[in-house]
Image: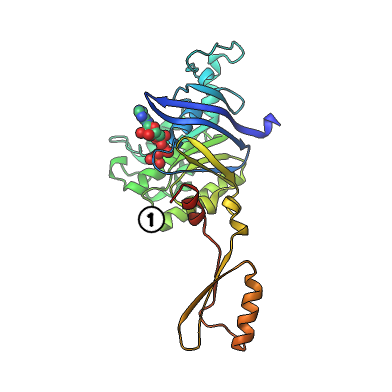
Amino acid sequence: MEDELAISVRGLRKAYGDNVAVAGVDLDVRRGEVFALLGPNGAGKTTTVEILEGYRQRDAGEVSVLGSDPGLVLGSRPRGSRGSSRTPRRGAADWRSRVGIVLQGTGEFDELTVAEVVRHFSGFYPEADDPDRVVERVGLGAKANARTHTLSGGQKRRLDVALGIIGRPELLFLDEPTTGFDPEARREFWELIRDLAAAGTTIVLTTHYLDEAESLADRVGVIAAGRVIEVAPPNLLGNRQDALATVSWRTPDGTPETAQSATPTALVAELAARFGGEVPGLTVTRPTLEDVYLSMIGH
Ligand code: ATP
C-alpha cells in the first residue's frame, strides 16, 4: 500500500511566527496520478509544497515523499524530532534526482542560451533526458539559440518546465505552471503534462485556473486557511454531480426562461413536447468546478 503512494502527509503544521500557514494537513498522492492543489492566496499551498520538496522545514507532522522524509534526507528535519540513521544524507542526491521541481518564475540565466542552460542542467542528473528533445518538447525549439533574457514571460515558464523535467523525475512539482501563458501555450503545456503522466510521472501542481485543474487532474485537493477541505476527482468535488441542473430556453416570444431541476432529462422531454420539436436556445448546465470551489471556500 505504501508503495502505491508517491506522497503521504499526516498532521503537517507550519507557522511563520504567529501566522499558522499550514494547520494540520493530511494528504496522499498516489503514484502516477496528477494531483492539483487549489486554494485562495495565502491558503498554504506553496508552504505545503515547499515542505514536500525539502525546501522548507516543518514544525510538526509526518511526511513521506517517494518513500523518504525530505526533512531527513536533506538534513532539515523538524525542530525537536530525533534523527534516524536509516535515511542517510548521502541519499540526498539520489532522492533529489527523482524529484523534479518547477518553481514560480526563474527562467533567466544571463547570457546563456536556452539550449546551453538545459544542457548544463542535464549534467546534474544521472539519467537525464536528451536536452534538445526536452527543448522541443516544451515548445522552445525555435528559441533554442536565444539568450534566456530575451525570452517572453511565457517562454521563460517553458524553460522552467524544461529544467523541471530534464532529469526524468518520477515525481514532478509544478507551482502555478501556466501563469502568463497564452491560451495556445496552455493547451500545449497540458498536452505535455498528459504525456508525462501517461509515461508514469506523478505530478503535483498548484494552480488558480479551475479549468486547468479540471482538464489535467485525476484528483484535486482544496486547501483553505492551512487545512484540506476536500480531496476528490474534479467531477465529484462538492457533490457536484448531484447538484441541480439549470435548464434554460426561450419562449416563442423570445423571453429567456430558466428552471432548476433534479430531472433535467424529463424537463427537456416535456419542453420538446411543448414546442413540438426543437427547443429554442436550450442549454442544460450543472455547477462548474469554479462554482463549487468558490462556495467551498466561502464566496
Ligand atoms: P498563493 O496562492 O498566493 O501562492 P499559497 O496558498 O501558496 O498562496 P503560502 O505562500 O503557503 O500560500 O502562504 C501561506 C501563509 O504563510 C500566508 O499567510 C503567507 O503570508 C505566509 N507566508 C508564506 N511564506 C512566508 C514566509 N517566508 N515568511 C512569513 N510568512 C510566510
**Which of 54 and 270 lies nearest the eye of the viewer?**
270
* x and y, in percent, of residue 29 in the image: 60, 37
- Viewed as shown, does residue 204 lie left or right of 3? left
Which three-letter amino acid code belongs to the residue tagged 1?
Asp
Residue that numbered label 1 is attached to: 182
At a point 53% along the width and 47% down the height, the residue shown is 193
Is residue 179 in sight in this rendering? Answer: yes
* x and y, in percent, of residue 192 in the image: 51, 48
At a point 65% along the width and 69% down the height, the residue shown is 263
**Which of 169 and 235 lies nearest the eye of the viewer?**
235
The quarter of the displayed image where residue 86 is located: top right
* x and y, in percent, of residue 217 in the image: 56, 48
User: Which quadrant does ligand 1 occupy?
Assistant: top left
**Mark 1 CB within 8 Å of ligand 1:** no
The quarter of the displayed image where residue 69 is located: top right
SS at badge 1: loop
